[in-house]
Image: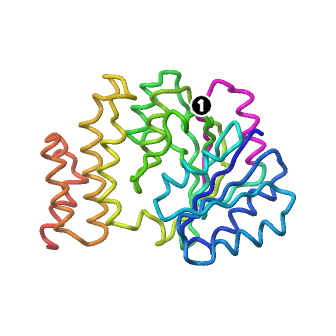
Amino acid sequence: MKVSFVIPTYNYANFLERCLLSVLQQDYHDYEVIIVDDGSTDGTSDVVSRIQSKYHSKAISYLYQDNAGPSVARNNGAAKAKGEYIWCLDADDMLIDGAIGRMVEATEAHPKAWLLFSGYRSVNEDGKQADHEPTLLGEDQTENFRRYILKKIKGLTPGSALVKEKAFETIGFPAGVHNNEDVVFYSHLFACYPAVSIPGIVLVTHRHKGSLRYNMQRIEETGLKSVDRLFDKDLLTPKQMSFRKFYLTRRYLSIFRSYYRNGDFEKARQYYKKAIQESPRFILNWSYLRKYLRSIVKK
């Protein structure tokens, strides 16, 4: 079997069927689907049962676990997978028609790549769309790692990527990290293994207030934990480890911006000060400094 879809879900029953149908109605059929229910209480199992009955000829598995977060759910799904490649969809994702066939062709053209990704289209609650085409990669793994953690590589999101199953045996998603867990995982892949980007769009993602990007508590709790998990000296080279200080500063600024947008100006100022203490030269960045000065006025 070539591809195993792993779909973690937590109280996303109203989105899950749409996601599953976008896979099951593709014109490529050598795959399995593993749904990992991360402790849902909203009837997710009923949605899965209905889909399993309707598409009884398809390989659709359902795993239930006590709530442990998306990283554990993806790792548990991957542990049950039979495919050579793992494709991690979120429950509110949708594949574009022909996506599986295109990505499978890419694996045959690039058999040495452990990570293959294409682009995605994001859609917000107002229906506004934006296409995120994938960035062309080089062959230097450390340079790809550096560019990725600095957000210079576009198009990569869990639902737009194929990953060799063996990567879950050697790396896997970081358990206990619920924000930026994908950044940790893909950073390690870039640092350790060959990767390739595939032109085009294969996925539609939906942004809504139920998404983790709107959960400030988890952004703060695990957004910084992800820094320590990302910069693992047992996985990274000394040169790759040298980017930690700069990356930590960027995380502080990201949390600062999130609190600023949510109107918690006191917390925003705390993280701005942490960033400047870590890397004083960022005080020259007018975009962040302007927000900090405005936060003082707004209290």
- In the rendered image, which quarter contains the N terminus? top right
187 sits left or right of 242 in the view: right
Judge whether 100 appears above or below 197 on screen.
below
Task: Name the residue at 25% across, 51% down.
Answer: 252
Q: Say which residue label 1 marks.
A: 114
Query: Residue flagged by tag 1: what amino acid is it?
Result: Trp
Image quarter for residue 111?
top right
Task: Name the residue at 31% across, 62% down.
Answer: 258
- Residue 204 in percent (x, y) is at 63, 58
Q: Is residue 70 one of those drawn in magenta?
A: no
Task: Residue lying at the far bottom in this picture: please name it.
Answer: 42
- Residue 273 in percent (x, y) is at 14, 53
Q: Helix, strand or loop at disc 1?
A: loop
- Residue 81 in percent (x, y) is at 67, 45
* Residue numbers of the magenta segment: 99-120
Q: Nearer the viewer, residue 181 or 67?
A: 67
Q: Nearer the viewer, residue 197 or 30?
A: 30
- In the rendered image, which quarter contains the C terminus? bottom left
Image quarter for residue 197?
top right
